Amino acid sequence: MLAISSNLSKMIIFIFAIIIIVVLCVITYLYLYKDESLVSKHYINYMAIPENDGVFTWLPDFFSHVAVDISIYTNVEDDYFFSYFSLTNDDGGRFKKTLTVRAREQVAKIVSKNDSDTKKVWCKYGKIPGQGDGVNLFLLVKLMLRIIL
């Protein structure tokens, strides 16, 4: 009877060890996984974006032509993009006036989970020049100013 109990204990410990190893492997994979299909490009201003770069096939018609410090991240496989850019105070004020529809609170919470610096979220419909008459819904997010010393 003692031999059966001892073997059962060893088997349970072995199964738990396997489960722990599998969980650690999954956590390690998720931590180290990099989205290989995400492509990033950076430009000093809107005019610096080359015509044939493919970036314009992602940008909506309302994207500010006076934007500076532009970073664009695209993922062709999953068909999405996001961009960070800056505007001067005057240009930012004019651009903000075109943003009339605030996103619902649930959407803002989802966005802020991905970027804790989220301040406000708007929804805006726009067309992508050269992509037909289809209208797409875009989320625009205002981030808090970060100062890094």
Image: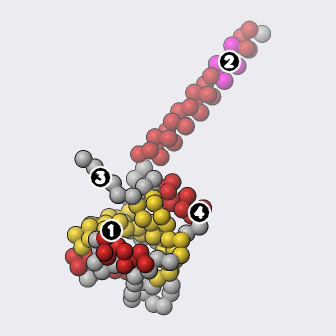
Choose mark 1 or mark 2, whichever is in front.
Answer: 1
User: Between disc 1 and disc 2, whose residue precedes?
Assistant: 2
Q: Which residue is mark 4?
A: 105
Q: Which residue is mark 3?
A: 147
Mark 4 falls on what kind of element? helix
The amino acid type of the residue labelled 1 equals Phe
Mark 1 falls on what kind of element? strand
Magenta stretch holds residue 75:
no
What crowding class fits label 3: few (fewer than 14 Cα within 10 Å), some (14-19), or many (20 or more)? few
The amino acid type of the residue labelled 3 equals Ile
Q: Is residue 131 above or below residue 71?
A: below
Q: Which residue is mark 2?
A: 9
User: Between disc 1 and disc 3, whose residue precedes?
Assistant: 1
Question: x%, y% of residue 41?
Answer: 29, 67
Mark 3 falls on what kind of element? loop
Question: Does the CB distance between marks 1 and 2 fall below 8 Å?
Answer: no
Q: Nearer the viewer, residue 110 or 118?
A: 118
Q: CA distance from mark 1 to mark 3?
A: 15 Å
Q: CA distance from mark 3 to mark 4?
A: 27 Å
Q: CA distance from mark 3 to mark 2?
A: 57 Å
Choose mark 3 or mark 2, whichever is in front.
Answer: 3
* Residue 58 in view (yes/no): no
User: Between disc 3 and disc 2, whose residue precedes?
Assistant: 2
* Residue 5 in view (yes/no): yes
Q: CA distance from mark 1 to mark 2?
A: 60 Å
